[in-house]
Image (cartoon, rainbow, N blue to C red):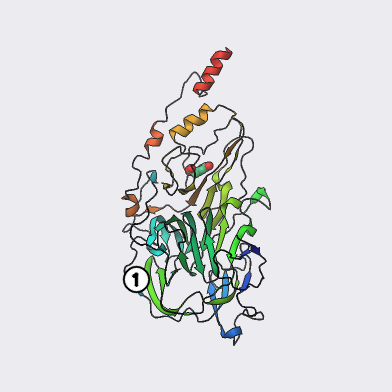
Amino acid sequence: MDQNQPTSKTNVPDFSSSNLQYQSGLGNHFSSEAIPGSLPHQQNSPLICPYGLYAEQISGTSFTTPRKLNQRSWLYRIKPSVTHEPFKPRVPSNKRIVSEFNERNSCVNPTQLRWRPVEFPEVPTDFVDGIYTMCGAGSSFLRHGYAIHMYAANKSMEYCAFCNADGDFLIVPQEGRLWIDTECGKLQLSPGEIGVLPQGFRFSITLPDGPSRGYIAEVFGSHYQLPDLGPIGANGLAASRDFLVPTAWFEKELRPGYTIVQKFGGELFTAIQDFSPFNVVAWHGNYVPYKYDLSKFCPFNSVLVDHGDPSINTVLTAPTDKPGVALLDFVIFPPRWLVAEHTFRPPYYHRNCMSEFMGLINGSYEAKTDGFLPGGASLHSCMTPHGPDTNTFEATVAKGENPGPFRITDTMAFMFESSLIPRVCPWALESPYMDHNYYQCWIGLKSHFSSEETNYKSEIQIKEDETSN
Ligand SMILES: O=C(O)Cc1cc(O)ccc1O
Ligand SMILES: [Fe+2]
């Protein structure tokens, strides 16, 4: 079980996977040491570090970023990261990863798109090879944009760590746990939790359950943070203390032939070294990997009339420089009570200047009775109309004006929402999992218009009116 630890606690390394300790908080300055006394306390870069460790800084923002946004950590390691052979293009590469979206590698498509869940690979495939980009915008080189990936894998990474030089990964596992070794320590992610692996951190993923599948929102040139709460006040939605950060853990053994796979401009490079990159004995700072259990989210909702905008369910946001305009919002649709009176309670029909990529972790989604399945995905781009399917509309209206409080249970859908318009990768458009009949889910929406009677009445209401007259 996760145990929240005070941020300054010293931890004796615990190598068993089932008894991990975490520190709690988001945006804190953390510190952790796997051997008591291994963290320098008076300064960051002593001439000789305790235990003969090397000091190394990892910067997630420019040195001169304003203090409240500045992110960096100091790692005290057995050998510095630089101790490796030159990077070489990885063979085989993963040609389905994109980090710069243009007319040569991706398409524009305003159609409502939906994909069925993919099957797990038949050949051994680790997390790195299992990633495939669905869509995205902008460029990792220009430090502005995002990529939405999905992954399907069945094999643990062995003697191999991944390092994403392009952006931050927000990973949403849908099936199968991910045990992630990071330079700050171990993180265990289960479906229902999310993990953030910031740009530049090395990590290696073990799949304790075998086949694993999920979603990734990668942001270039921005970092995830908690949304402002505005009039909600000081509490609600995702709480800082529910974010969990690893505690220091290290491997000191020689590991000849250890491979670092570096994603740089969407291309993969490898470098060989003779030790594990997880050789950090102590560290401190505010640039860290972390995880969050979505069941801890404290949702707010409409308590009288109308359906609130989904921004009310924002877990994390990666901002642009424009106030209130997200590079990428991570929004969830968790179990909650619906109580609004004489209100169409499912999501309204709409067109949005923001683009919406959706996934489903478990259960079903309130706007779709079928076709949107756990592990599947949909994309409604800028100004593409969408909303509840015909069955949802008819079933909702049939319930009448005030169906009473209703609890949506056993579900977790989510949305990656961006102000940048995505281009879609060719393999996503040509995928055998593409639902070419998606549009059909709305085709059955009938006109209920009558110039005499302005209010639509369900069959049930019509019968009730007839009996009362
Ligand atoms: O399109 C969707 O299903 C996502 C969504 C949900 C909601 O409750 C309101 C608006 C919205 O875009
Ligand atoms: Fe929407």
Q: Nearer the viewer, residue 277 or 72?
A: 277
At a point 35% along the width and 60% down the height, the residue shown is 96
Total numbered circles: 1
Q: Which residue is mark 1?
A: 90
Image location of residue 457, percent across then percent down: 51, 23
Dot 1: element: loop
Residue 179, compared with residue 339, is above or below; it is below
Q: Residue at x 64, y 78 (%)?
A: 36
Query: What is the crowding at mark 1: few (fewer than 14 residues within 10 Å), some, or many (at least 20)?
Result: some
Across and down, in percent, residue 38 comes to 62, 80
Answer left or right for 469 relative to 97: right
**Residue 285 point in image, percent of width and height:** 60, 71
Q: In which quarter of the view is residue 448 placed?
A: top left
Q: Closer to the camera, 81 or 18?
A: 18
Q: Is residue 419 above or below residue 68?
A: above
Asked if residue 64 can be seen in this view, the reply is: no
Residue at the spot x=52%, y=22% of the render?
A: 460
**Residue drawn at point x = 50 percent, y = 80 percent:** 80
Asked whether 3 or 44 is in front, the reply is 3
Image x and y of residue 237, in percent = 62, 51
Asked if disc 1 is less than 8 Å from ligand 1, the answer is: no
Q: Amino acid at mark 1?
A: Arg
What residue occupies the far top of the structure in this picture? 469
